[in-house]
Image (cartoon, grey):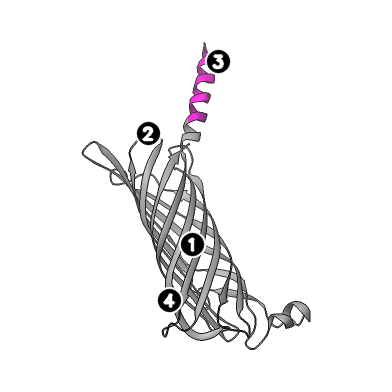
Amino acid sequence: MRILNSIICLCFAATAANAQTTTTHMLGVGPSKILDTYLTPEHFSGIGFTYLYLREQQPDSIRRFTNTIEHEVDFANTHDRSHNANDLELTYNLYWGRYYNFRPIADGLRLQVGLAANLCAGAIYNMTSSNNPAQARAALNIMPSATAAYDLCIGNQRFSLRYELNLPLVGVMFSPNYGQSYYEIFSLGNYDHNVVPTTFISAPTFRQMATIQWHYSSKWSLRLGYLGNYQQAAVNNLKQHTYTHRVLLGITRSL
């Protein structure tokens, strides 16, 4: 009988552990602002779109550390101030976070603190330039990260509020040097400080996301949110930034 009780407890624990994972798919739209002085000193702005996939291990009374994985794909069609030139921007960001979970406080307020690794890859294409029309982007960042979540009920409906903040620390990025062409880098093999270490001073990149989640069933919920991603750097006598603001809407499933 004791063995049977142990087996039942183990099965229940495994089921509870699996139920603590959620997956979210969200689509977003909003303004984008782009600057890349390798292509042009002009500032570009326009409308962009984002797909975001978020997989979270929910904290519980057993696990003190949990992981979060986020895939973010951004696309924007932007124009300069005179509407005479256009930039197309496509960027993929992978975020892997490892968090320490504090015990719930203040009637359901949950706090997490940890580190997130960010892998960024993308490109900008200037549709009106014939000289160096494209710029590739690649970077790896280590970012301190924190989240806060709060559950509340309105009537007989359950909601969850969540806020996530990623701050810059250190990293490494690819960048041509001022006046250097991609032909020199990849065809002639002329390396000129093209892999650059970065810090929160030279690349003050940060990201924030706030969401509200409506649990309309035991496994499914609707999530509405805001995503702000501010990627910027000043290296090799070049400046670049991509600022994205998105209103997000999607669904979350508990596994």
Residues at marks 4 and 1, CA–CA distance in whole angstroms: 29 Å
> Dot 3 corresponds to which residue?
3
Q: Separation of disc 1 and disc 2 at Cα?
A: 32 Å
**Is 120 in the magenta?**
no
Q: Which dot marks residue 218?
A: 2
Relative to residue 72, is residue 134 depicted above or below? below
Report how far apart the C-alphas of labels 2 and 3 lie in the structure. Answer: 31 Å
Question: Which residue does the numbered mark 4 point to in the structure image?
Answer: 45
Give the labeled residue for mark 1.
144
Question: Can I make out residue 109 in this image?
Answer: no
Residue 56 appears at what percent x and percent y?
48, 46
Q: Secondary structure at mark 4?
A: strand
Write down the region rendered in magenta.
1-15
Choose the circle earlier in sequence order: 2 or 4: 4
Does residue 100 sit above or below 80 in this rendering? above
The answer to whether 11 is drawn above or below residue 240 in the figure is above
The crowding category of the residue bearing disc 1, from other C-alpha atoms within 10 Å (few below 14, some 14 to 19, many at least 20), is many
Q: Specify the farthest residue to the top.
A: 1
Could you give the CA–CA distance between mark 2 and mark 4, rounded to whole angstroms?
Answer: 41 Å
